[in-house]
Image: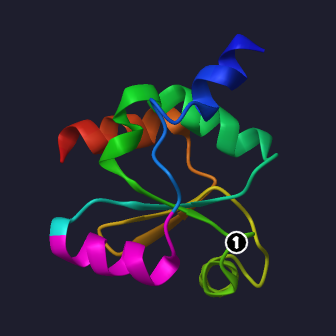
Amino acid sequence: MLLFALAASPLIFPASISAAEAQARSAADGKPIVYWRPGCPFCLRLRATLAFQSRRLHWVDIWKDPAAAAAVRAVANGNETVPTVILRGEPHVNPNPTWLRAAIRAR
C-alpha cells in the first residue's frame, strides 16, 4: 500500500499532460514520453522503479486523451498496451523499468 501511495504521490509523480503537449515538450527538451493509464500494474511498477526520476519524463494518461490512446495503438499493433515509452523517437511497449531507468540516466 505504501508503494502505491508513493508511486501515486503528486510530490514524486508529475501530473499527466496531453499527447500533443508531451510531443511538443519532448521535441523541445528531448525527454521521453510515457503513455500510461490508472490501474495498470505494469505502469505502477514503472512509476515505482523510476521514483524521483519520473520528473525526467512526460507522462500521458491514455484514458484522458483519445489522441494518446491512438498514438499507443499506432505502435502496439492496434492495442492500447501500456506503459508505452517513446525514447529518442523510438517506441518501446512495456519496457523493462530497470532498462528505462538506465536509459534516462544515460541521457
| Residue at the image point whose x is 24% and y is 36% from the top | 105
Q: Quadrant of residue 36?
A: bottom right
Q: Identify the element where label 1 is drawn.
A: loop
Q: Position of residue 71 (x, y in %)?
A: 59, 83
Q: Is residue 20 above or below residue 15?
A: below
Q: Is residue 26 above or below residue 44?
A: below
| Residue at the image point whose x is 45% and y is 46% from the top | 14
Quickly name the residue at label 1. Answer: 64
* Residue 27 painted magenta: yes
Front one among 88 and 1: 1
Mark 1 Cα-neighbour bin, 10 Å: few <14, some 14–19, many ≥20: some
Q: Position of residue 77 (x, y in %)?
A: 73, 82
Quadrant in which the N terminus appears: top right
Horizontal placement of 50 versus 87: left or right? right
| Residue at the image point whose x is 23% and y is 77% from the top | 27
Horizontal placement of 63 versus 45: left or right? right
Q: Amino acid at mark 1?
A: Lys
| Residue at the image point whose x is 29% and y is 68% from the top | 88
- Determine the residue located farthest toward the top in the rendered image: 2
* Secondary structure mainly formed by the magenta segment: helix
Q: Position of residue 5 (x, y in %)?
A: 67, 22
* Residue 107 painted magenta: no
Q: Is residue 14 above or below residue 16?
A: above
Horizontal placement of 39 versus 60: left or right? right
Horizontal placement of 60 versus 53: left or right? right
The magenta stretch is 17-28
Q: Position of residue 97 (x, y in %)?
A: 53, 37
